[in-house]
Amino acid sequence: RPTVVIDEYSNVTFQEELAAYLKRQTAGTPQTIQSVRFAQSSKDRLIQLADLVAGAVRASAMGNHVPLREIEHQSIGLSHWPPGAD
């Protein structure tokens, strides 16, 4: 069962509520989350990567497509939603 790792850029109350929410939402499904842990992006390369991708996606959604296009060639796949919104 999956473990989810999230950037700890938040307070403890939010982290506890988010972990409980994610576990509730996936309970009884094949993707039931076993555990949620929080990591500092400065110490976890996968969190750094997720931050980079999330920032590029956000910039693209706001109209600045340059950051996403700079990393798009490294992606396995990228789907725009809704279709045709690229």
Image (cartoon, helix red, strand yellow):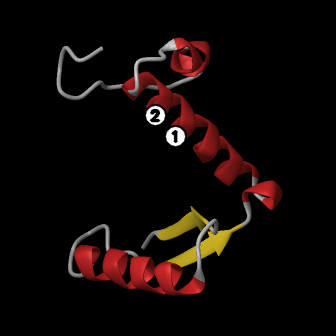
Compared with residue 62, is residue 55 higher up or lower down, i.e. above or below? below
Residue 49 lies in quadrant: top right
> Badge 1: how crowded within 10 Å, few (<14), some, or many (20+)?
few
Q: CA distance from mark 2 to mark 1?
A: 6 Å
Residue that carries the numbered disc 1 in the rendered image: 54
Alpha-carbon neighbours of circle 2 within 10 Å: few (<14), some, or many (≥20)?
A: some
Q: Is residue 9 left or right of residue 69?
A: right
Q: Residue at x 41, y 76 (%)?
A: 18
In the picture, residue 21 is in which quadrant? bottom left
* Image vertical order of residue 62 relative to residue 30, above or below: above
- The image shows residue 3 at horizontal and vertical percentages of 51, 71
Which is closer to the viewer, label 2 or label 1?
2
Q: Nearer the viewer, residue 8 or 30?
A: 8
Q: Position of residue 44 (x, y in %)?
A: 76, 57
Q: Quadrant of the N terminus?
A: bottom left
- Numbered mark located on residue 58 in the image: 2
Point 48% across, 79% down: residue: 14
* Dots 2, 1 in contact, CB < 8 A: yes
Residue at point 58%, 85% (across, down): 12
Q: Secondary structure at mark 2?
A: helix
Q: Amino acid at mark 2?
A: Arg
Give the total of numbered labels: 2
The answer to whether residue 85 is left or right of residue 37 is: left
- Helix, strand or loop at disc 1? helix
Residue found 30% across the figure and 14% down from its top: 86
